[in-house]
Amino acid sequence: MQFHSPFEGAWADPETIHTILTGEWRLQRPVTREARCSHCGLCFLFCPNGCVRDRGRHFEADLDFCKGCGLCARVCPVAAVTMVEEEGA
Amino acid sequence: MTTATDLRVMDGNKAAAMGVLLCRPDLVASYPISPQTPLLEALYRASAEGRLDAETVEVEGENSALSAAIGAVAAGGRAFTATSSMGLMFMYDAYLFASGQRVPVVMTVATREQTAPHTVSSGQQDIMMVKEGGWIQIVAESCQEILDSILVAYRLAEDPTIQLPVNVAYDGYYLSHLSEAVRVPEQAAVDRFLAPVGQGKRPVLSAAAPLTFGAFITGDLYTEYRYKHCQAMQSALDLVDALDGEFLAAFGREYGGSVETYRAEDAEILMVGMGSHCGTLQVAVDALRAQGVSAGVARLRMFRPFPRARLAALMRGRKAVGVLDRSVCFGWGSGHLFVDVKAAAADLGGAIPMVNFIGGLAGTDLRREMLERAVRATAARARGDQGPEVVWLNLE
């Protein structure tokens, strides 16, 4: 019998938590044009998944967790984010 | 060695309260419902008088009662709650959460029928409605056994290999409201009995070492937790039998672990039941033995996990088995216990004539006359007589 958790029930250590990569559910992904991004942070504030990361001079989604909802593209005031179909999705 | 005890007269609710006080819970959260209410009154009175050093939470319903208990146990405490009938149904989602999340809370159920038809009468339908909920279920026969089973329940629940919630069920009104002599053990003896379990033996929530509790789980890991839950349930069968010996050494009383028998060794027919009427069943068996009917009793003390192997061994070689039910299993047209006993009998290979007796619904007494009728009917099957598989004792 192969086990993956040291716990008897759905307890988890936050350091070794069993993580579900919700990015696997995505049908389209946000692509940010870095030069166009004004670093205003609206996409960061609106992302319902909390997966937009501050890269210093621009923001972009962490694709491990981004579900591809497209809200960041909708709220971007300078149209720096475009949604692109995932190939094979 | 038997320790000194205090002999008192009390009803089943009071005996349950006494058992809870002796286990020193950190939290009691419950909502009043008949026939459980006097238990709650006894605990809150103890709290008001300083005899219960526990957080008492006045909740707005049973769902919150069990949820509060779950939180306390997750934080490392010992918690108690109690309910009956509709209250048990109202906490159903929390009930499944407690077991699936492996939260060792202890809850008594003073059993009662389910509405509709509306009634506030005794019956075992409520605990049968949750029998697949992943809790351990103990069913007591006497007020003494209610008190004693609560001590055993905490030992089972909080055992590191079990970590499961436990119901201690007792027949509403017949046990909850009728008084008997009950020996109340000494606090020090109970403390020693419970010493192997308690804080530090299982994962707990704390700010110092944070853990996620109730994580979202999919696929293989979900399957792993279900497997572990099943294994823990089955291992409770061995543990409850082992604890019976330990209980005898500590308090001088024993209950046979998961199954208690009466005059069963040489019996040609075996009557199987669960709950307070098993006392009357013993009287019926005595009366019929005097008339030459070789009958014995197997009382299931643990219904979940089901003591399949022990019951099958007890049924081996019998000429007929009669099963008493105080609940009905819709879809099988019989009682719930009957379905499980038949499944256990299948392990023996050969077919044993089996007959089911439904009675004692909605607070009707399972009188000695009715139980003698059940034993006689089972003896008739042993002789090869034909008859219905399910007999409704009240309607004959």
Image (spheres, coloured by chain):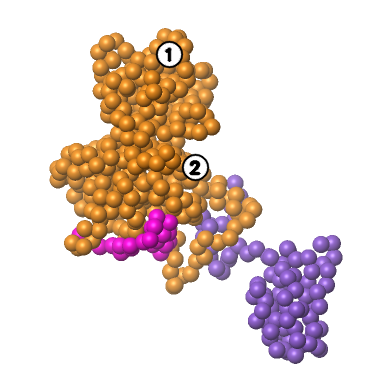
Chain colours: A purple, B orange
Q: Position of residue B130 (x, y in %)?
A: 46, 43
Q: Place residue B141 in its image quadrant.
A: top left
**Helix, strand, or loop for circle 2?**
loop
The amino acid at mark 2 is: Glu
Is B26 one of the magenta-colored residues?
no
- B98 horizontally vs B6: left or right: right
Q: Position of residue B33 (x, y in %)?
A: 33, 50
Q: Which residue is mark 2?
A: B132
The residue positioned 23% from the left and 53% from the top of the image is B42
- Give the extent of the magenta segment: B51-76
| Mark 2 vs 1, N-terminal side | 2
Do discs 2 and 1 belong to a common subunit? yes
Q: Quadrant of the C terminus of chain B?
A: top left
Q: Chain of mark 2?
A: B
Q: In the image, which disc is placed on residue B381?
A: 1
Q: Can residue A66 be seen by looking at this rendering?
A: yes
Q: Position of residue A64 (x, y in %)?
A: 71, 70
